Image (cartoon, grey):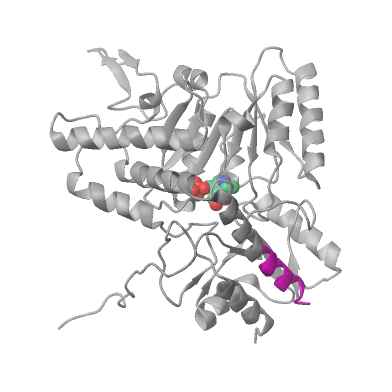
Amino acid sequence: MTVTLVPSLPTLVTPSRPDPLGVLGVPGEINLDYAASAPCARAASDAVAELLPWYASVHRGAGALSRRCTLAYERARQTVGDFLGARPDDHVIFTRNTTDAVNLLARALPAGTTVVTFAGEHHANLLPWPRGSVRLPVPDSTGGAVRSLDAALGELSRDARPGLPVLVAVTGASNVTGERWPVAELARVARRHGARILVDAAQLAPHAPVDLAALDVDYLALSGHKLYAPFGAGVLVGRADWLDAAPPYLAGGGATSHVGAGTHEVRWATGPARHEAGTPNLLGAVALAAVCAALAAADRDALHAREQALLARLRAGLAALPHVVELRTFGPDAPRVGIVSFVVAGRDSGDVAAHLATAHRIGVRDGLFCAHPLARRLLTEAATRSGRRDLPATALRASLGLGTTESDVDTLLTALATLP
Ligand SMILES: Cc1ncc(COP(=O)(O)O)c(C=O)c1O
């Protein structure tokens, strides 16, 4: 007897959509959840398929397959670093994702470092930091963010023990509202106060070019799976000195330059290898690099303009629905990427998301989006602004990118307008 454990899934195809990366998808399924995990770019899947017959060890073998894989891995590092504007002496360390990258940096902080964040961050950029970190309140404008950081760093330099490092850790774009944070201005403020800055580019990099050197940012973290490269790699890029002085993130093979007979007789490598012990995720790195190369070759201004047009259509459509309230931090006209969070008054967000999925084959996210302090605050603000007392305790989020069409947006708007 044959038992079917899972229903058969439709064959993956590349839909004929105006996007140069040819992101994959399933006909009929409307994916508006890119901010959680974006669909796979054809460039990423092609790069993986091409390398798979050669798949072998990295940094560990003399055979032709191994040598090719080692080369592919190190080329991927170079491509990703170039794409992100890494300076020649920056390290490009492959990680699992943004969370892993931020945790790595948190473990590499010199003793006594004070970390300054805003309460508007994703948990990945709130929770890894040591006790004693400073969490600034969510500002209500980008100018407010700059002023608040300036004041906090000024106070720290007066009060903190002189000479101890300070790291500012901010997002490039909010995963809740899509609003862009004023990274270049915040970096200037940090620099003026002698602090370093990390940008969590998980949500910004899929939508806009990010260049470490041009922004004068010290560290940058992102996830491949949000950048159309869902093969399990992320990256931490940035200044070498703290990273080379820190204990290895993982202890093990590949991270050492010498191991003696005594239990603790070990010299750790410097460079990315110090924090990449164990066999690396070659396919993840190669997929991420393939997307970086494809995006570098694409007309990003045109992609941005197209995405902004879709976003404007979505936001205008939501604003026209009397029972829908958008969440926002900085105001209606602040620059943002293709992410919108909102609530449907009188409706549980989980129920709405489930209805969109079952009745309309639309995938969105609901909840507090791993940014609980921010999402709760914005829900309270939305209730005040709208004057409604029947807003739910969690929100819905629609997020878009390459491969999203006007029809996807319109289908969502019609579904929300006709909720049973
Ligand atoms: C702004 C931001 N930072 C960090 C993360 C964590 O990313 P990951 O889950 O890939 O580690 C996310 C994920 O949604 C995010 O939106």
Measured as percent of width and height from the top left, residue 10 is found at 34, 75
**Left or right relative to 320: residue 305:** left
Measured as percent of width and height from the top left, residue 394 is found at 67, 64
Q: Residue 375: tell me if it is visible.
A: yes
Residue 317 within the segment the image draws in magenta: yes
Q: Which one is nearer the viewer's eye here, 184 or 309?
A: 309
Residue 311's place in the image compared with 152, above or below, is: below
Q: Residue furthest bottom?
A: 420
Residue 254's place in the image compared with 283, above or below, is: above
Residue 98's place in the image compared with 410, above or below, is: above
Which image quadrant for residue 378?
Answer: bottom right
In percent of the image, x 69 and y 46: which residue is there? 120
**Left or right relative to 361: residue 175:** right
Measured as percent of width and height from the top left, residue 158 is found at 80, 17
Which image quadrant for residue 32?
Answer: bottom right
Magenta-tinted stretch: 311-322
**Left or right relative to 96: residue 138:** right
User: Where, quadrant-wise, is the C terminus in this rendering?
Assistant: bottom right
In percent of the image, x 84 and y 67: which residue is there? 386
Residue 146 within the segment the image draws in magenta: no
User: Where, quadrant-wise, is the N terminus in this rendering?
Assistant: bottom left
**Left or right relative to 2: residue 317:** right
